[in-house]
């Protein structure tokens, strides 16, 4: 945001003011996600989409310029970063190099009323290029304010009572698309028979805002219609395989969360990217910044993919608040932060601050010096409101971002999608390029083995023993798929499985043990019983292409395999870190029939002695 602030202050002082007040029935907190969706609002108002260009300053910071059709001529301007403090304040400033304006700013303010609802003030500040343009500009801006008023009242009438995705109020009238919805539902019915998902997905395709259909997130669809997230994702995979949808691997910028790189095939995926808006280079991490999205085939719907507003709050929902500071500026603001973890950072400063907020009655007062480096410390804040005195102690302007770390949004990560058995069955040819390795910060790996399988073949002969072994595979693979996992490969009588959730993985191994208990009870002959060994561990690893399939490599994989070797049969052995995970403890609390005992072991190839936990289900005992 490099600019002569003395000149900017003079422009602000010269600005004409035009204000409109709207009385809305909902409170500010309910309206905030919708009235700050400027990208959708500008499109609905019929404004021209700007052409944005970015000028890099230094690593982590750049200038934003735009060219847009304006008052009978093309306008060129520098746009400063938006400011916002939810749910009451948002503002943006522009300085013009060409066009009818020299300066233009908009301030949005929402103030709750004691009797209910809120007052919404929209204020324009402008400096014309010459004095005779004052009245034409006022005429155009008044017309824009009337259009905004109609839009805000329309939003106010459509705000939902419960789910808040931030775009429910922008759906099109379904009556205009009933025939298309019906036809597509009929085509999709065979993909998922006797299920509501095909009709709901068809409704979404034809009525949701362009922006949300262009990058269709299955979890958003599921939450909007209150459907199961994974089932909606499964349907998207099926519809992609059938040629109705396109699948995209999106590499997200860790700063703005924009999809800097998108590719339709995993073998074309780039492992590094540069975000010109944020001016940073970054790497792909499959479970942190690689998202799987979908889009309808162009024959289903023509979509407007222009960007009408690049940096509003709803374009970066992970940033809770954002403030701009001139050199040496001091200002005091009040923030209402929900409970959770937050990170404070600025592209212009080194270091980061962390807050852990616990909502309690009262106001916490904080003095925050913005200087470099920011010390990477975590501060516990117990208050429902924060009064912060900011002081920019640097010689340059900066933008401060307060990011939510506890809100992961509705993103289907690539790591999660590729663990699903449905994906591995439908898209078995989707693999990484040879030699490409992608990091995964955390994945759960399962290794199984069938005990005494050699004796099984000697006792029953190859054909019958193979049938028993196949039954063992069927039990394990079916349960892995049912618990949102996937089979990576089989090795002889062993299975390697993968999960993205610790809790789901432990639920799966408990179900496997219970299923084998049931199977064995149905076969009185001891020579026909099947004894399974299970080992489970979670941690970071590398994903790669091995023998034309997605596989996993690293010390986590090795340790998981060694842990399976500690199983005695009819039991499951877990690493201590996995056993102590909160999700795992929650699952075990729900299964009082499961017995757990600790043990220590020196695993082959592992230097340090390991603490492990052995799980048994019901009356079964290790053999």
Image: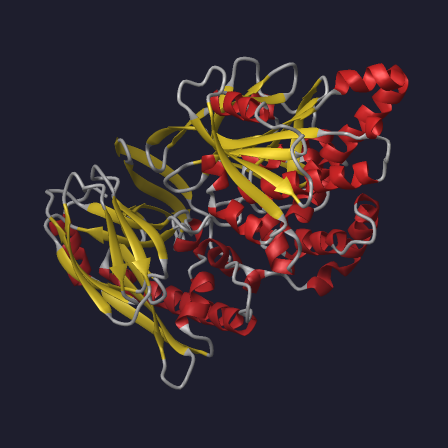
Q: Can residue 93 be seen here?
A: no
- Choose between 521 and 551: the one closer to the eye: 521
- Choose between 214 and 122: the one closer to the eye: 214
Q: Residue furthest bottom?
A: 115
The color scheme shown is secondary structure
- Residue 395 at x, y percent in the picture: 10, 42
Up the image or down, 454 lies above or below 249; here it is above
Name the image quarter holding the N terminus.
top left
- Residue 248 at x, y percent in the picture: 59, 34
Q: Can residue 200 be seen here?
A: yes
- Choose between 49 and 295: the one closer to the eye: 295
How many numbered callouts? Answer: 0
Horizontal side of 466 relative to 2 (left or right) equals: right
Name the image quarter holding the C terminus.
top right
Residue plotted at (59% across, 49% down): 219
Horizontal side of 380 relative to 115 (left or right) equals: left
- Residue 522 at x, y percent in the picture: 85, 39
Residue plotted at (68% across, 54% down): 206
Horizontal side of 480 relative to 369 (left or right) equals: right
Horizontal side of 180 relative to 47 (left or right) equals: right
Residue plotted at (26% across, 59% down): 381
Up the image or down, 131 lies above or below 345; here it is below
- Residue 352 at x, y percent in the picture: 25, 42
């Amino acid at each position: 945001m490099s600019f002569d602030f003395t000149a900017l202050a003079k422009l602000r002082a010269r600005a004409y003011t035009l204000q409109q007040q709207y009385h809305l029935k909902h409170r500010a907190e309910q309206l905030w996600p919708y009235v700050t969706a400027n990208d959708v609002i500008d499109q609905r108002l019929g404004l021209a989409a700007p052409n944005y260009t970015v000028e890099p300053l230094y690593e982590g910071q750049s200038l934003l310029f735009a060219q847009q059709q304006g008052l009978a001529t093309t306008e060129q301007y520098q746009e400063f970063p938006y400011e916002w403090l939810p749910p009451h304040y948002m503002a943006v400033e522009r300085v013009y190099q060409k066009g009818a304006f020299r300066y233009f700013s908009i301030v949005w303010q929402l103030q709750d009323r004691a009797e209910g609802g809120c007052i919404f003030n929209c204020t324009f500040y402008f400096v014309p290029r010459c004095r005779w343009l004052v009245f034409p500009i006022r005429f155009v801006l008044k017309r824009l304010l009337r259009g905004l008023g109609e839009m805000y009242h329309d939003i106010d009438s459509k705000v939902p009572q419960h789910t808040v995705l931030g775009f429910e109020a922008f759906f099109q009238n379904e009556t205009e698309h009933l025939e298309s919805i019906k036809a597509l539902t009929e085509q999709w019915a065979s993909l998922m028979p006797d299920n509501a998902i095909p009709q709901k997905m068809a409704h979404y395709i034809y009525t949701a805002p362009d922006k949300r259909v262009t990058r269709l997130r299955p979890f958003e669809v599921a939450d909007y219609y209150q459907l199961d997230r994974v089932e909606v994702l499964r349907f998207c995979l099926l519809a992609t395989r059938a040629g109705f949808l396109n699948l995209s691997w999106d590499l997200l910028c860790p700063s703005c969360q924009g999809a800097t790189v998108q590719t339709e095939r995993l073998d074309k995926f780039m492992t590094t990217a540069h975000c010109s808006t944020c001016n940073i280079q970054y790497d792909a991490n499959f479970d942190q910044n690689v998202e799987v999205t979908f889009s309808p085939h162009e024959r289903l719907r023509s979509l407007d993919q222009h960007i009408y507003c690049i940096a509003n709050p709803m374009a970066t929902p992970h940033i809770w608040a954002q403030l701009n500071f001139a050199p040496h500026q001091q200002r005091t603001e009040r923030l209402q932060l929900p409970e959770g973890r937050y990170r404070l950072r600025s592209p212009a400063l080194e270091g980061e601050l962390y807050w852990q907020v616990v909502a309690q009655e009262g106001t916490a007062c904080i003095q925050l010096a913005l200087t470099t480096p920011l010390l990477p410390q975590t501060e516990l804040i117990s208050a429902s409101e924060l009064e912060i005195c900011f002081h920019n102690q640097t010689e340059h302007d900066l933008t401060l971002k307060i990011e939510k770390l506890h809100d992961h949004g509705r993103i289907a990560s690539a790591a999660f999608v590729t663990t699903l058995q449905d994906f591995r069955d439908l898209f078995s040819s989707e693999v990484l390029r040879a030699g490409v390795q992608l990091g995964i910060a955390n994945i759960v790996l399962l290794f199984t083995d069938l005990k005494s399988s050699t004796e099984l073949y000697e006792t029953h002969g190859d054909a019958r023993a193979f049938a028993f072994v196949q039954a063992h595979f069927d039990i394990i693979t079916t349960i892995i798929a049912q618990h949102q996992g996937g089979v990576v490969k089989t090795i002889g009588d062993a299975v390697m499985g993968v999960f993205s959730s610790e809790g789901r993985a432990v639920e799966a191994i408990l179900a496997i043990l219970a299923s084998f208990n049931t199977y064995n009870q149905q076969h009185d002959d001891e020579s026909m019983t099947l004894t399974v060994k299970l080992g489970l561990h979670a941690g970071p690893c590398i994903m790669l292409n091995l023998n034309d399939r997605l596989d996993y490599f690293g010390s986590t994989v090795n340790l998981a395999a060694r842990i399976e070797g500690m199983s005695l049969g009819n039991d499951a052995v877990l690493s201590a870190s996995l056993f102590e995970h909160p999700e795992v403890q929650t699952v075990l609390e729900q299964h009082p029939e499961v017995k757990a005992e600790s043990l220590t072991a020196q695993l082959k190839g592992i230097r340090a002695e390991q603490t492990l936990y052995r799980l048994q289900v019901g009356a079964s005992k290790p053999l």
